[in-house]
Image (cartoon, rainbow, N blue to C red):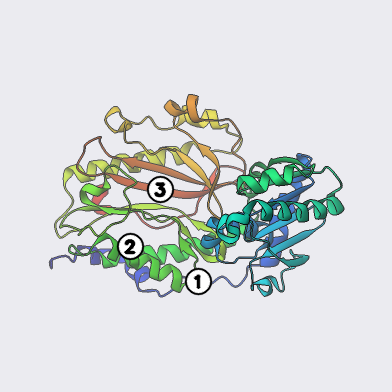
Amino acid sequence: MAEFDWHAERSDLAGLAQLDRAPVDDDIDLKAVRAYRQGRVRAEMARRGIGAVILSDPVNIRYATGTRNMQVFSMRNAPSRYLLMTAKNSILFEFTGCLHLADGFETVDEVRPARTASFVAAGPEIAARERAWAAEMADLIGRLAGPGATVGLERLNAGAALALESQGLRIVDAQEPVEMARAIKSDEEMKCVMASLRATEVAVAKLRAAIRPGLTEAELWSVLHQSVIAQNGDYVETRLLNAGPRTNPWFQETSDKVIGANELIALDTDVVGCHGYYSDFSRTFHAGPDRPTPGQRDLYKVAYEQVNHNLGILRPGMSFRDYAEEAWDIPDKYYANRYYLSAHGCGMTGEYPYLYHRGDFPDAGYDGEIVPGMTLCVESYIGEEGGAEGVKLEQQVLVTQTGVELLSRFPFEEDLLR
């Protein structure tokens, strides 16, 4: 075998790595997707007696309307773009010069220029700007939802929220209704999820084919980014690709560390991909040129066992507490470095619910029900405290009426499972 060529033996990945893009699904009714999502938000608002919501998280705005604009920028600069939604009205306040971006979206009844109520935009006049913003919103909400309406807010600066409350409105947190809305996917939505996953799998295959000792972590990570963007994905939410000793503990951000021969390389995709949907699976590779060591294989097989056990117990109607009780027991030597969650919801980003390990449930966990239409990511990180390396694996699934359907199809490493 030629030096550094052992990856080329994977016939199941050769074709995937050669694709420039995943096959495009032209049979997605995006208008139906938008209508379903907006209806979900309104239904959850109604259940809680919420007359209006002001959404400033760009992912939530996209969920409720389908519109997008500078998502990462908007996450930091809030409120510079926000949505007011009631039972019958949807008014998008768009960033300066961008009002045209909502043209053609039937989920938006009106577009108005946003009044950016942030210190960056207003400087020492911030308090006056917040009061003016609150007065404008309160007047509009009063006309659309009635005086003294209950208003859901999320991700606003404190001054804006306090100024709005001073207008006589009852303020509640909008995260609950929006998260509960997002948790259940329609069949048409699932086509978007699958399109994002297939594109991300093409990108991971290209990354895997590019693995060579001597590259930096960042150089290798950029291969995935390039492919995601070329396939019209949006962005990668984290920087989670590490090699060798930087795979343990987990959550060390991608760096200029040079990948050494025979090191493990672990990654978590965290891709906000096609149609804005999250593609979230994890894999661990081996740099070559030699075969993995027995210790590396042991780590991999233990992580693989954890993921597959927990996939096997998931079922509709199961409580979060029962899941924690039935989930795989993490061996003591790996427990300190365990991943902080056993599983989590996944849609346009990571979302509700969080499913915790049994040992963490008393302090961090909460109960609820796993129901059909949820998409979940089942997690594993295996690495001893102070150990040389670690393994990250994760699978994305859909909860069905009878069990779960595997969504992430990128294959595991045969040489690490032997």
Q: Is 340 situated above or below 325?
A: below
Per the image, the residue denoted by label 3 is: 394
In the image, residue 29 sits, relative to residue 56, either above or below, namely below
Q: Amino acid at mark 1?
A: Asn
Q: Nearer the viewer, residue 281 or 119?
A: 119
Q: Nearer the viewer, residue 80 or 154?
A: 80
Amino acid type of the residue tagged 3 in the rendering: Glu
Label annotation for residue 266: none
| Most foreground residue, 279 or 17 | 279
Where disc 3 sits, the SS reads strand
State left or right for residue 411 relative to residue 71.
Answer: left
Coordinates of residue 90 in the picture (x, y in percent): 76, 59
Disc 2 and disc 3 in contact, CB within 8 angstroms: no
The answer to whether mark 3 and mark 1 are in CB contact below 8 A is no
The disc label shown at residue 221, or none = 2
At a point 54% along the width and 56% down the height, the residue shown is: 75
Q: Amino acid at mark 2?
A: Trp
Q: What residue lies at 21% left-to-right and 38% top-to-bottom?
A: 387
Label 2: element kind: helix
Cα separation, mark 2 vs mark 3, equals 18 Å
Which label lies toward us, 2 or 3?
2
Disc 1: which residue = 232
Question: Looking at the picture, how far across and down is residue 224, in whole percent?
Answer: 37, 65
From mark 3 to mark 1, how far is it between C-alphas? 24 Å
Q: CA distance from mark 2 to mark 1?
A: 18 Å
Q: Quadrant of residue 79?
A: bottom right
Count of all numbered marks drawn on residues in the image: 3
SS at badge 1: loop
